[in-house]
Image (spheres, helix red, strand yellow):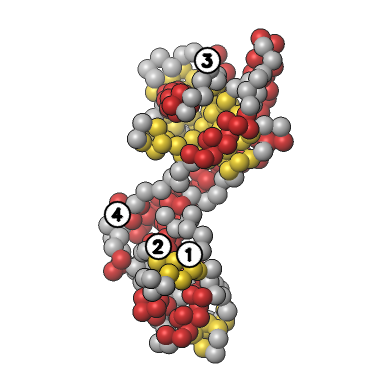
Amino acid sequence: MILKNRTKPIVLEKLDAAIGRLPTNFPALSDMQSEAATRYKGYIGEQKVDYHLEQFAREYTMFQGICLQVDGKTVQFDTVLITKQAIYLIEIKNFSDKITFDTILHQFTRSDGQKETGFRDPLIQAENQKNKLQQWLRAHHLINIPIYYFIAISDPSTIIDVIGDQEAVSKVVAHGEHIPRKIIQKEEVLRKKAPGSFNHSKIGQAILGACKAHDFDILSRYGVKKRHLLTGVHCPACGKLGMERLYGTWQCKACSKRAKLAHLRAFSDYFLLISPWINNKECMRYLRIQSRNVATRLMKTSNMKYQKEYKRWIKADRRRAL
């Protein structure tokens, strides 16, 4: 069973929302767009690997992207598979062109044929992830559970090269479609030694109860303040801001498209970027409407809950409004 499906990362949601509400001359806009594109590429790569690994969910317990607090710090795991034999960590890397693992100098590089760039060694990263999870398990009285890791390269066209110990690298590194075979082979070896006895469902529930959202203040990194964010409602057809509220619907000034629920995206942006709550006055300012009654009606019908003691509205489901 998949106890936690992979969803669009909150950090990426925030980037997308902010990019759509910043003026074109905002100094850091191009850098934000570049980071969003990189994160999108990684997210799509993770989904590609998910496709190959989901076969294990019928029999075992799986997490597609989780964060745990370990020794006061948030640790992110791409994919966690729990069987009766062991726990498997699958770290997903989305590199294109040619990558090289150097086990002699403990280096990792990517080359596009013209330029070579160095990155953190995924082998060391995966070993650290394993140690962190072992530490978390011990802290929760889950001991003697073997942990193994694999590094999945999401792009099947990526060339994998090794300088040094090819056998060691080939045991844990492969394109995403080959990782299930490696897991199955490892499971067979472990079963021959001793039949598995771990309650993977129980371990999974313990992890699920401790999961945290992977989030941080991405806007501060780029100097984005509330005053920089443009108000208004996006047109779902042309993307322009500033739809007008006319006769119970929204109409775009640029393309004349009408949309009844265009304000839902605006509210989603608000909760992601500005505040976990909104009141009537702020709603009127943000949506660029003049009527208090219209503002109240829109909030009431937009999956929000009214906090009478504070005279404000919050999302009915707060989990994504971090």
Contact? badges 1 and 3 (CB < 8 Å)? no
Q: Which residue lies under the disc numbered 3?
A: 168
Tag 2 secondary structure = loop
Tag 1 secondary structure = strand
Q: Nearer the viewer, residue 209 or 95?
A: 209
Contact? badges 3 and 4 (CB < 8 Å)? no
Q: Closer to the camera: disc 4 or disc 1?
A: 1
Dot 4 alpha-carbon crowd within 10 angstroms: few under 14, some 14 to 19, many 20 or more: few
Residue 115 location (% of width, % of height): 40, 35
Name the residue at the bottom extreme. 247
Quadrant in the picture for residue 81: top right
- Going from N to C along the chain, the mark reached first, 4 or 2, is 4
Gap between marks 4 and 1 measured at Cα: 23 Å
Q: Residue at x 52, y 15 (%)?
A: 168
- Going from N to C along the chain, the mark reached first, 1 or 2, is 2
Residue 231, relative to residue 6: is it above or below?
A: below
* Mark 1 residue type: Lys
Q: Nearer the viewer, residue 272 or 309?
A: 309
Residue 263 location (% of width, % of height): 50, 74
Q: Which residue lies under the disc numbered 1?
A: 315
Q: Which residue lies under the disc numbered 4?
A: 220
